[in-house]
Image (cartoon, rainbow, N blue to C red):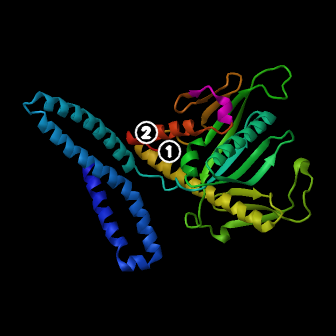
Amino acid sequence: MLDKLEGVERRFQEVEGLLSTPEIVRNREAYQKYALEHADLERIVAAYRDYKKVLRALDEARDLLRDQDPDMKALAREESEQLTGRKEKLEHDLKMLLLPTDPNDDKNVILEIRAGTGGEEAGLFAGDLFRMYSRYAEDRGWKVEVLSQHTTGVGGMKELIAMVHGKGAYSALKYESGTHRVQRVPVTETQGRIHTSAVTVAVLPEAEEVDVHIEPADLKVDVYRSTGPGGQSVNTTDSAVRITHLPSGLVVTCQDEKSQHKNKAKALKVLRARLLDQMIQEQNDRISQERKSQVGSGDRSERIRTYNFPQGRMTDHRIGLTLYRLESVMQGELQALLDALSTHYEAQALLGGQGH
């Protein structure tokens, strides 16, 4: 680890030098690139320099332990204990800082929520989950934009696709992909029986054109009239858009906007994110096959969480965490849960398992 840190410090000094050269200062693109690298390395270098200071202070304290004066010895022992604790914390922090970061962490998110088994009740819970994520996003000062939605007759949702705009949105929400199970008495249930329903959630990082290039020739674009509940035609122009990506077979439809151009732009955004997600999944599969130790495959069919309304509890099955405050979770108070998931997967990555 120390060799690696020495290398990081050398690179930091190099980049610092580059940022003060006139040709880099004049080249805006190059300057931004090096400024970003400088900011990334600065946190590691600051912690490493701290660590070296602590090691020097520890050596001095240990020398003083050999002192004949009992007061001086007691003081040195106390200082040595404090410094050892600080050294261990810095070692842990440095290991975390050296973990490869997910290049998508700072990106906006495309959130896809679909009702699974459970009919109308699954549709209602899909709506509840969307409100939960929306409230969480609002608390963080992020913006939520609905790209496409298919509602059910009783106010639920068959499918909803939304964009969450906010720095670090993917980092916060990436562990939400999977099957969310709900146990409660549906409003339509007259006997008071508890039903179990399922909703799938997919969290995809927004893909820029530089991340995923789509050849226009690979797309089949169909336009048609958008339909409302019960199949009635909502508007009289062909504004709804269906895009089929021929090489992958992925199909995206969008009919929320009155303008065909806007629907096409939104559909392309979703398609690009799905293609990037496919690339990430394939890459993760390759890595996990090489390592043979997969930490949660991220498989969307995996049941990740249960929301039990009669008992007021939420259980995340991946980390064995149960919270008895379901109501506040459904109001968007997710930070404690998301932090616990993040810590779990970081610890797995430190053990040499595969981050998710």
Residue 356 circle label:
1
Residue at image x 39%, y 63%? Answer: 38
Is residue 328 highlighted in magenta?
yes
Which amino acid is tagged 1?
A: His
State left or right for residue 323 relative to residue 64. right
Name the residue beneath numbered marker 2: 348
Residue at image x 30%, y 39%? Answer: 86
Measured from the top left, where is residue 75 in percent x and y? Answer: 19, 32
Disc 2, disc 1: CB below 8 Å?
Answer: yes
Determine the image quadrant of residue 235. Answer: bottom right
Which portion, as a residue range, is magenta?
322-330
How many numbered discs sit on the rendered protein?
A: 2
Which amino acid is tagged 2?
A: Gln
Residue 292 in sight in this render: no
Residue 37 in sight in this render: yes
Q: Counting other residues with Cα less than 10 Å from the Cα at mark 1, is it few (<14), some (14-19), or many (20 or more)?
A: some
Measured from the top left, where is residue 354 in percent x and y? Answer: 44, 43
Mark 2–mark 1 Cα distance, whole angstroms, equals 9 Å
Choose between 222 and 78: the one closer to the eye. 78
Choose between 303 and 194: the one closer to the eye. 194
